[in-house]
Image (cartoon, rainbow, N blue to C red):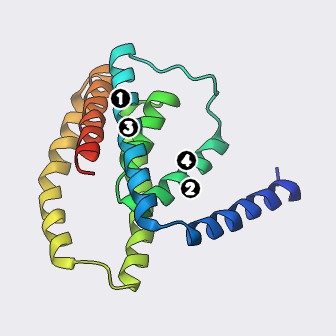
Amino acid sequence: MEPSPFRAGRRSAAIVLGNLLLRKIDKAVLNDYLTLLLGSVLLVTSILSLVKGEIKTPIRPRREYLYVLGFVVGLAVQFTSVGAGVIVSFTLMNLARVNPREVVGVTIVYGLALSSLSFLNYASIGSVDYSLAALLVAGTVPGVYLGTHVNSIADREKLKKIINVIILIIGVLILLGR
């Protein structure tokens, strides 16, 4: 089914409006508020998920929302460099109720695409410290191996709790690091 011209027009208008707003807003102030918002959302939602076990929302998950989620996360990551895996993982696992093992795989593929596009943009403006990035990548190798092994043997509910605890810790660290 092809999108209606009205929807395409609304989407284009939103992109133009967003572009204009981003040019007028002080980036440092926006970054501070986005970081505060992100940390708060992660903290509150992970606590709710750990306490209640499942977050029920009045919104039924739909494929169109994934586009919006991708847009919001892509935008937030460009300002804060925090959020892609955390926001997408939490949303897919707790709101869309996707199996935690699948969430990790989907989030990694999404993160790869997002990171690749972001890298190309930041490399083109000369904002990449390659030696720092290489050290991070070297530390990633054992972490990926261990994480994949744990993911393959962990119980679904335990894995969900582990991921929510990690999200809680990230939320606290974001708020403390502001």
Badge 1 marks a residue whose secondary structure is helix
Residue 97: percent from left, percent from top:
49, 27
The single residue placed furthest to the top in the displayed view is 52
The residue wearing badge 2 is: 71
Q: Is residue 5 visible?
A: yes
Q: CA distance from mark 1 to mark 4?
A: 18 Å
Q: CA distance from mark 4 to mark 3?
A: 18 Å
Of the numbered discs 4 and 3, the one sitting upstream in the chain is 3
| Residue density around tag 2, few if under 14, some if 14–19, many if 20 or more, within 10 Å | few
| Residue density around tag 4, few if under 14, some if 14–19, many if 20 or more, within 10 Å | some
Of the numbered discs 3 and 2, the one sitting upstream in the chain is 3
Q: CA distance from mark 3 to mark 2?
A: 20 Å
The residue wearing badge 1 is: 46
Q: Which sits in the foreground, 143 or 14?
A: 14
Q: CA distance from mark 4 to mark 2?
A: 5 Å
Badge 3 marks a residue whose secondary structure is helix
Do labels 4 and 2 touch, CB within 8 Å?
yes
Q: Is residue 140 depicted above or below 173 in this figure? A: below
Do labels 3 and 2 touch, CB within 8 Å?
no
Residue type at mark 4: give it: Leu
Q: Is residue 102 visible?
A: no
Residue 13: percent from left, percent from top:
76, 63
Which of discs 4 and 3 lies nearer the camera? The answer is 3
Residue 169: percent from left, percent from top:
23, 36
- Name the residue: 58% across, 45% down: 66
Residue type at mark 3: give it: Ser
The residue wearing badge 4 is: 69
Which of discs 3 and 1 lies nearer the camera? The answer is 3
- Name the residue: 31% across, 30% down: 164
